């Protein structure tokens, strides 16, 4: 039995990961400061004797004997990471230093939840891990993008300098159950708007693209990455099926049979115009990993989940 620390464990991805790792008979410590996460996401796990909950902020050091660390703590939705940008940088950078320091002291393997945002508004399409990105360091998204880029640098340097056993995954837009109704990202916004017959708000002309990954595929990729031998990444984990935001809005309306209308609002500053992962490296290094759940199926599950939240 392994003891595994998940920072940001009460968030969307973290709570799904807690559940999967408990199902696989591990001991799980879920650490969170509840900035965007919620106890509701992990309430069903509280009766499990192998599950522990810790209220803590990763910008402060934390000590615990563990075998593995998944470092997920960080607000991920643009609305939330831009709310207190200094805190976002501290969470990414000081959080990474604290968790890497812990991994070094207790000799734990540590996986960093990095992001496709390290590619910024990409000029190469689809994005391969070898692409260095096109990131504005003084814009509204910089606190997150540069914070995550610096965290990757720290992971690599702790590996080279201190021999820490690291893994870096770059997660592309992921959605599914346990997203907060107030998350603010596009999938949850559109579904909530559609289910409540409000206008669907597209920022800009809706021609910008994203590639949406269902949560179960990400969790499988994360676990395979932690187990992979002689491979530290960075590796893209995402679904390469690309859609415009307008197509997403139309799909959500169709699946919810909503009366909502689509409206176009101001484009957001530095909003990436296109995003799609090249997943050949993940496929090669992670035992043939590739996403299994496509958009329509994943949206149906997510719509079911949000209906329960609106009851
Ligand atoms: P989320 O906002 O639901 O979860 C983040 C969790 O971290 C929350 O529970 C929050 O309370 C916690 N947290 C934030 N700051 C903290 C701090 N200082 N100390 C302790 N806990 C803190 O978002 P998510 O989608 O679950 O994202 C999880 C991780 O995955 C993030 O690091 C994010 O950058 C990364 N990621 C997610 C996506 C995606 O599409 N969901 C894409 C790329 C990267
Ligand atoms: N978006 C939108 N309406 C919304 C929320 C987001 O049109 O209510 C757009 C946003 O401008 C971006 C895309 O959807 O082009 C994805 O946004 P999200 O916040 O989900 O994540 P991002 O990939 O930008 O970090």
Image (cartoon, rainbow, N blue to C red):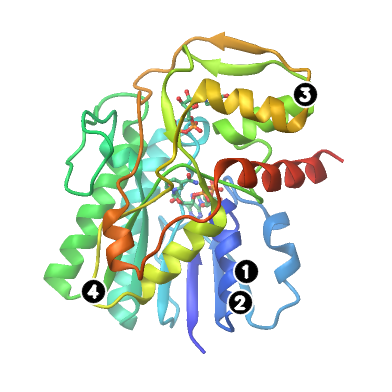
Q: Is mark 4 within 8 Å of ligand 1?
A: no
Mark 4, residue position:
164
Mark 2, residue position:
22
Q: Residues within 10 Å of mark 4 (few under 14, many from 20)?
A: many
- Pointer 1 with pointer 2, Cβ within 8 A: yes
How far apart marks 4 and 1 lie (CA) works out to: 26 Å
Q: Residues within 10 Å of mark 3 (few under 14, many from 20)?
A: some
Mark 3, residue position:
258
Q: What is the x, y in percent for residue 218? A: 48, 57
Q: Earlier in the sequence, mark 2 or mark 4?
A: 2
Q: Is mark 1 within 8 Å of ligand 1?
A: no
Q: Please determine whether, in this image, residue 268 is positioned above or below residue 218.
A: above
Mark 1, residue position:
19
- Pointer 3 with pointer 1, Cβ within 8 A: no
Residue at 45% from the left image edge and 31% from the top image edge: 82
Q: Secondary structure under badge 4?
A: loop
- Residue 33 seen in render: no
Q: Earlier in the sequence, mark 3 or mark 1?
A: 1
Kindly report which numbered mark, 2 or 4, lies closer to the viewer in this rendering: 2
Kindly report which numbered mark, 3 or 2, lies closer to the viewer in this rendering: 3
Q: Nearer the viewer, residue 294 or 31?
A: 294
Left-right relation of 275 to 79: left
Q: Please determine whether, in this image, residue 82 is positioned above or below residue 179.
A: above
- Pointer 3 with pointer 2, Cβ within 8 A: no
How far apart marks 1 and 2 lie (CA) works out to: 5 Å
In the image, which disc is placed on residue 249? none
Marks counted in the figure total: 4
Q: Please determine whether, in this image, residue 223 is positioned above or below residue 192.
A: below
How far apart marks 3 and 1 lie (CA) works out to: 32 Å
Residue at 72% from the left image edge and 41% from the top image edge: 303
């Amino acid at each position: 039995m392994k003891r595994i620390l998940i920072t940001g464990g009460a968030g969307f991805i973290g709570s799904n990961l807690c559940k999967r790792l408990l199902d696989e008979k591990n001991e799980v410590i879920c650490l969170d400061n509840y900035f965007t996460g919620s106890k509701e996401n992990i309430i069903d796990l509280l009766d499990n004797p192998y599950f522990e909950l810790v209220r803590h902020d990763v910008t402060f050091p934390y000590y615990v004997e563990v075998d593995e660390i998944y470092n997920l703590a960080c607000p991920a939705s643009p609305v939330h990471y831009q709310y207190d940008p200094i805190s976002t940088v501290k969470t990414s950078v000081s959080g990474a230093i604290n968790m890497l320091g812990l991994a070094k002291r207790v000799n734990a393997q540590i996986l960093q939840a990095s992001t496709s945002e390290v590619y910024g508004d990409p000029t190469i399409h689809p994005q391969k891990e070898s692409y260095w990105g096109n990131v504005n360091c003084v814009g509204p998204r910089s606190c997150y993008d540069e914070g995550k880029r610096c965290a990757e640098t720290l992971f690599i340097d702790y590996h080279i300098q201190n021999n820490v056993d690291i893994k870096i995954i770059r997660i592309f837009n992921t959605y599914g159950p346990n997203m907060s109704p107030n998350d603010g990202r596009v999938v949850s916004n559109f579904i909530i708007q559609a289910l409540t017959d409000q206008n669907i708000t597209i920022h800009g002309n809706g021609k910008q693209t994203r590639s949406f990954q269902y949560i179960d595929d990400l969790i499988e990729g994360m676990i395979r990455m932690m187990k992979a031998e002689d491979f530290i990444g960075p590796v893209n984990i995402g679904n390469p099926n690309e859609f415009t935001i307008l197509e997403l809005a139309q799909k959500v309306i169709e699946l919810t049979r909503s009366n909502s209308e689509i409206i176009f609002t101001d484009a957001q500053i530095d909003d990436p115009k296109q995003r799609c992962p090249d997943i050949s490296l993940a496929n090669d290094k992670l035992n043939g990993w590739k996403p299994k759940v496509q958009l329509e199926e994943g949206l149906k599950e997510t719509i079911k989940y949000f209906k329960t939240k609106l009851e």
